[in-house]
Amino acid sequence: MISLLPSYRETLVSNRPAKDVLQRLAVSTSTKPFLQPDEPELLFTGWVMDDRFRISLRVRRANHYLPLVVGRAETTSTGSILMLRYTLFPTIQLLLKLWTVLIALGVGISTFQHKTIYALWIASGMLFLMYFIVWSNFRMHLATTKEVIRRVVS
């Protein structure tokens, strides 16, 4: 199924054992969402558990387009494999879906009342612009997030 919401999947292969990779991620991850002045510069916020993790880049202020990285690590005979899925945060996904539904309802009501399709064209343009902005910003932050994860894992 094709999704309008941005997401990206990636598989990383490391020559380090899965336990070591997860330990490196855990050392650079904080449970606090924003950078604190009294804390060392940790790269991620989130959690790292047994063989899985859920992290995002740590920032000074909220960034709605920052990818959430949900991953799993598996041990292989020569190292480990990390299966990563980059998505928007669930609340942002919910808001995007909500606005899509509200705009569609507004178009339906407006088209029915005014008997013209101008509202349909305007709403389609608004939705296209909204999703274009979301996809563009997600892709921009995705590159940074992928680079930092690769640096920590290798």
Image (cartoon, rainbow, N blue to C red):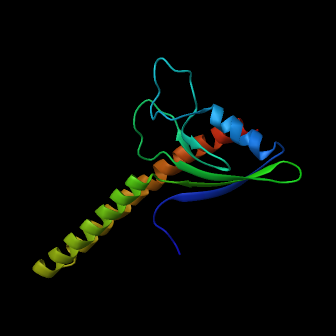
Residue 44 in the image: state x and y as whole percent: 56, 36
Residue placed most toward the observer, 108 or 59: 59
Residue 25 vs 82, above or below: the answer is above
Query: Residue placed at 66% from the left, 53% from the top?
Result: 72
Residue 49 in the image: state x and y as whole percent: 62, 45
Farthest residue to the left: give it: 113
Residue 48 vs 90, above or below: the answer is above
In the image: residue 6, left or right of residue 130: right
In the image: residue 154, left or right of residue 7: right
Query: Residue placed at 11% from the left, 78% from the top?
Result: 114
Residue placed most toward the observer, 108 or 117: 108
Q: Quadrant of residue 64?
A: top left
Q: Quadrant of the C terminus?
A: top right
Farthest residue to the right: give it: 77
In the image: residue 69, left or right of residue 11: left
Figure label count: 0
Residue 41 in the image: state x and y as whole percent: 56, 24
Residue placed most toward the observer, 1 or 143: 1
Q: Quadrant of residue 112?
A: bottom left
Residue 25 vs 89, above or below: the answer is above
Residue 49 vs 42, above or below: the answer is below
Q: Can residue 114 be spotted in the picture?
A: yes
Query: Residue placed at 59% from the left, 57% from the top?
Result: 8
Q: Can residue 129 be spotted in the picture?
A: no
Farthest residue to the front: give it: 50
Residue 101 in the image: state x and y as whole percent: 29, 69
Farthest residue to the top: give it: 38
